[in-house]
Image (tube, rainbow, N blue to C red):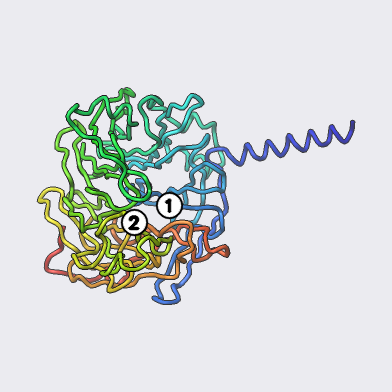
Amino acid sequence: MKKTFIFTILLSVLIGVCEVKSQIGTRFPSERKVVKDSVTGVDLIFLTSTPAGDSKIYPTHPQWSADGNWLIFRSNRVKGEAMAVNESTGDIIQVTEGGYDGMLTLARKEMRLYYMRKLDVGDMEVVSIDLAKLFADSMTKKLKTKSVYETIHGIVPKAIGNGGDMALDAEENQIYFKTNKEESAKHLAENVSIEPIFGPRNMGAGPGGIASMDLKSGEISHVVSVPFQVGHVQTNPWAANEIIFCWETGGKSPQRTWTVLADGTGLRPLYPESEYEWVTHEAVISKDEVAMAIMGHRPVDFGTENPNESSAANPGQETSWGPSGTREKPTGLAIVNIRTREMRIEGQTESGSGLWHVHGSPDGRWAVGDDFSRTIYLIDRNTKEMKMLSTGHKTTAADHPHPTFSPDGTKIQIQSAMLSEDDRSMNICIVSVPEHWLKRTYDQVFQ
């Protein structure tokens, strides 16, 4: 009886510890360390450095809090919860409680984090966190219950929603999210032909759609329906009511990039592509520009040898993707102007896969990309000079580096397995633009 009593007490204590550990605002010790890239000599600032299942927000969305001091990221430090790390001090703070689904979405005008959270019935509630209040209370060790920091803006019913992929409008008064096939079909014209699957991943079939939610009233409105699978919904953070999205197939699409306005007008391909172009990983980088990769990862004589072989280190080799992705046509890091519709290729690696995940600085000076080897390349958009910025991030990593510029255009966030003993677990890392590049002056800066 005594042993049972002691065991019960110990169990209660352990449960209590777990509950405290999962509370919003819980702090974790700094892991910040600076590592010099052994090849390029560039300092890599690892804001996390333990194998805790870290991964950054996707490059389509903001990474830094509105004050520029904190980066939000996913982590298994507390399974299913999101974290923030202070770039200067390395302090790590838990910023959600009760889980989240899909995209973590940071506001730029105020210290607020938006996300969706699944309810028991399968509906999704749209939640935001007052980061300023949370960080202040965490620092002073005066944490309150999560309801003090949370605002519930509305519910996306299971009957219309399609996961937690969402984006915040530039005015920060509404969010956009994907709708499921049934809901999307209701708003599609009868004479529109539904697209079938495309490529070996059996993805891409329609219909798909986008809806919006007013963050004050919770009112939901339909934006647009299309005859294909919708993916990577993002907004232009500098232009209200402007949405960018893609035809998602898991690889090459017949027409990858699309744009539409919040009222459903203006639907068009962002960059009209041919069957010979493999366009992917589009990201809004400034008020008028979207960066994207035109892949050059297949041999010119593609299809003559091992046509169906593909791997994590050399993906996209299956013949069912079609004839695109070779360097018989122009490839590289491309930037398209939303207003003029003009496209420029800013650079491309001399060999290998070519640039894969791409981004750029809002001031128009820099572009950045990674390749299949997980090497990071920086491009000066004025001179077209390309520099290997960092390498050694391991092709065995759980994901790709996904380089993303800071709002001030002086540094790049990546995720890296460089420090991982298992060669897979990633950490959050900052790479600065070299000081002598930042000091360059030009007669003209392209914007």
Q: Residues within 10 Å of mark 1 (few under 14, many from 20)?
A: many
Residue 249 percent coordinates (x, y): 32, 47
- The amino acid type found where label 2 is placed reads Thr
* Vertical side of 78 occupied by 447: above or below: below
* Vertical side of 229 occupied by 354: above or below: below
Image quadrant holding the N terminus, namely top right
Q: Which mark is residue 56?
A: 1
Residue 188 percent coordinates (x, y): 22, 28
Residue furthest to the right in view is 1
- The amino acid type found where label 1 is placed reads Lys
- For label 1, the SS is strand
Please say whether residue 230 is visible from this viewpoint: no
Q: Residues within 10 Å of mark 2 (few under 14, many from 20)?
A: many
Residue on which the image places disc 2: 404
Residue drawn 30% across and 46% down? 198
* Count of numbered circles on the image: 2
- For label 2, the SS is strand
Q: Marks 2 and 1: in contact by CB < 8 Å?
A: yes
Residue 174 percent coordinates (x, y): 29, 32
Image quadrant holding the C terminus, namely bottom left
* Vertical side of 152 occupied by 412: above or below: below
Label 1, label 2: how many angstroms apart (C-alpha)?
A: 10 Å
